[in-house]
């Protein structure tokens, strides 16, 4: 009988078993009870614990991310995770990246279900908002693997914390920028989302519509279009929307696919080309978004620091693995870039 058996039986991490058996502080009373009950049921002996502990002191975490594709921000997030993983190795923290196809909730659920407490001490996931995903997260936590969400939340669920920007606030900021920068008495406002099944996209839309309807009622909101975070799809949809609505004076790009929006704005019909482009606010300062700011096609870009998100998620997972109550719970700061302050 080894310490691994105790951890699996109690549904906790190896570090938590270490704390309980050595009488260290920072473990919840209910957790202490589970570990002690597991020790009694299994007939665990202290010398087995010492031998087991000596064989493995690494902390092992997984980042569940959409597979590499056309989404520049997600690709940058992946690079931030890989860089953090390389830095953490010397601290005996092993971070690995697991893929699932973007927007594929069935495969995400399968990936979560495949995780084993013997191989993984915690998960940070860019997840999809859906009942099956919420259920799988709850099952994962019940098996003793804590989970934090990254960039996009899944709530309600048993996830420990969300690491990202306040997405409702981001939508409100976008609405304030567009509403104040549109200098015509009337017009239409377009919204482009990736998919409404993403919690962050839904929250941004909600915050945006709240401010637009309350403070700028003279500007008519068009129904949002879903570009699937794909530039090719987005270019066709936005191009058609601009052709059918020559009085679009503002555009909010809620998700990815900004290269498609840039192309659609740059190839407007001749009758529209003589007019200024719509006041356009997008997310994430990718190289393409930066160029669009400098050229005047984009008015503002709202940005989140993915390196901070990754660092906070790893710190939180380490604290959860040790059953410590305190871990980074700060909201990632939203940055606003205009042509005048673009780095």
Image: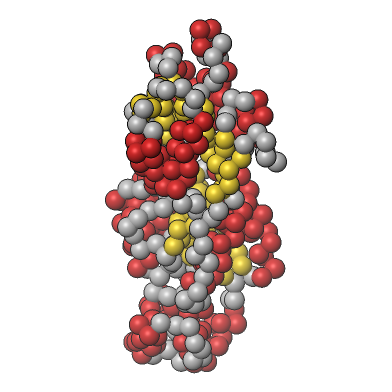
Foreground residue among 53 and 154:
154
Q: Say which quadrant the C terminus sits in.
A: top right
- Could you tell me residue 45's position as x and y percent? 46, 92
Q: Residue furthest top?
A: 270
- Could you tell me residue 110's position as x and y percent? 39, 51
Left or right relative to 46: residue 305:
right
Colouring used for the render:
secondary structure
Viewer can see residue 72: no
Q: Quadrant of residue 186?
A: top left
Foreground residue among 332 and 85:
332
Figure label count: 0
**What residue is shown at x 38% (from left), y 27% (from top)?**
219
- Could you tell me residue 164's position as x and y percent? 50, 53
- Could you tell me residue 87's position as x and y percent? 69, 61
Q: Say which quadrant the N terminus sits in.
A: bottom left
Q: Is residue 276 above or below residue 129?
A: above
Q: Is residue 300 above or below residue 3?
A: above
Left or right relative to 131: residue 243:
right
**What residue is shown at x 41% (from left), y 53% (from top)?**
153
**What residue is shown at x 54% (from left), y 14% (from top)?**
275
Viewer can see residue 33: yes
**What residue is shown at x 55% (from left), y 88% (from top)?**
50
Foreground residue among 328 and 206:
206
Q: Quadrant of residue 172?
A: top left
Q: Is residue 277 above or below residue 287?
A: above
């Amino acid at each position: 009988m080894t310490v691994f058996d105790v951890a699996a039986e109690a549904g906790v991490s190896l570090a938590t078993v270490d704390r309980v058996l050595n009488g260290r502080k920072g473990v919840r009373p209910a957790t202490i009870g589970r570990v002690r009950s597991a020790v009694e049921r299994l007939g665990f002996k202290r010398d087995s614990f010492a031998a087991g502990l000596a064989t493995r002191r690494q902390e092992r975490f997984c980042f569940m991310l959409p597979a590499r594709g056309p989404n520049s921000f997600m690709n940058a997030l992946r690079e931030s995770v890989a860089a953090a993983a390389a830095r953490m190795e010397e601290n005996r923290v092993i971070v690995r990246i697991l893929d699932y196809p973007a927007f594929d909730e069935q495969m995400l659920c399968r990936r979560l279900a495949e995780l084993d407490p013997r191989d993984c001490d915690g998960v940070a996931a860019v997840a999809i908002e859906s009942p099956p995903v919420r259920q799988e997260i709850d099952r994962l936590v019940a098996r003793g693997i804590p989970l934090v969400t990254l960039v996009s939340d899944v709530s309600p669920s048993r996830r420990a914390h969300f690491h990202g920007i306040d997405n409702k606030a981001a939508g409100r900021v976008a609405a304030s920028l567009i509403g104040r920068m549109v200098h015509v008495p009337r017009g239409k406002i377009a919204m482009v989302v990736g998919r409404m099944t993403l919690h962050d996209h839904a929250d941004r839309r909600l915050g945006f519509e709240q401010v637009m309807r309350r403070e700028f009622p003279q500007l008519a909101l068009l129904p949002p279009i879903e570009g699937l975070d794909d530039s090719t799809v987005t270019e066709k949809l936005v191009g058609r929307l601009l052709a059918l609505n020559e009085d679009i004076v503002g555009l909010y790009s809620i998700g990815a696919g900004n290269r498609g929006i840039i192309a659609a704005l740059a190839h407007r019909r001749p009758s529209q080309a003589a007019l200024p482009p719509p006041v356009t606010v997008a997310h994430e300062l990718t190289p393409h978004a930066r160029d669009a700011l400098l050229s005047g096609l984009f008015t503002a870009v709202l940005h989140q620091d993915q390196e901070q998100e990754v660092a906070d998620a790893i710190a939180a997972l380490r604290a959860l693995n040790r059953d410590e109550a305190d871990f980074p719970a700060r909201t990632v700061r939203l940055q606003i870039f205009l042509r005048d302050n673009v780095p």
